Amino acid sequence: MLDVTAGNRMLWPNKNPPNTIFLDKEIGLARPPHVFGEWRYLPFKDNSFDCIMFDPPHLIFMGPKSMHRNPQDTRGWWGINWPNRMTLLRTIVGAQREFARVAKRLIFKWGESRDGGKVDKLIPLFSKWQEIYRYTRPSQGRFRNPTHWVTMILRTSRARGLEVARYRPYDPFQQERS
């Protein structure tokens, strides 16, 4: 697996899971990535990974005193500010094309925010991918907006070997329900 938005690995209970490569472009993170790079220009050969985890920053504007601005904060580093919504959308479109080059599965995590957009508006931007599973975690406590986990496979002939009916998607909250 390739996590292209590793940050401080807040998504991962085990901060060093086996068979996972962490990529990020941020310098000075408390947990540095294995590979420094940009999502839209991945430094890997074609078909290098089985799956990509994509959890892009969701906010357009974070104030200068936001708790989410410190890359050393392992609890609240949310990555970059987008200057505007159009830049966010262009970046996601460019990234999904590159993901199709290096992997056949994609897990897209999206936390709906006040300014980042709704997941149903973003999924059509993933034109090379077919959604096969979606889990939505409802709003909770201080998080007033839902979080979506969308599993996709490539629409191309390279993905035809995947059997969608028997494919069991990754469920990040499986431990919570037990």
Image (cartoon, rainbow, N blue to C red):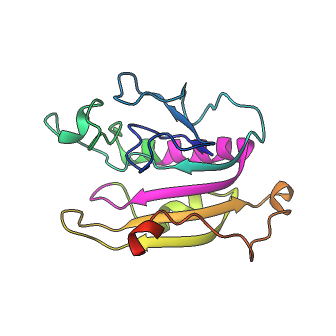
* Coordinates of residue 89 in the picture (x, y in percent): 48, 48
Q: Residue furthest left?
A: 65
Q: Residue at x 68, y 59 (%)?
A: 129
Q: Is residue 71 left or right of residue 158?
A: left
When the figure is inspected, residue 177 is found, relative to residue 2, above or below; the finding is below
Q: Is residue 98 magenta?
A: yes
When the figure is inspected, residue 167 is found, relative to residue 92, above or below; the finding is below
* Coordinates of residue 106 in the picture (x, y in percent): 62, 55
Q: Residue at x 19, y 68 (%)?
A: 141
Q: Is residue 25 left or right of residue 142?
A: right
Figure quadrant of residue 4: top right
Check the picture and name the quadrant holding the C terminus. bottom left
Figure quadrant of residue 131: bottom right
Span shown in magenta:
89-115
Q: Residue furthest front?
A: 178
* Coordinates of residue 13 in the picture (x, y in percent): 41, 51
Q: Residue at x 36, y 40 (%)?
A: 82
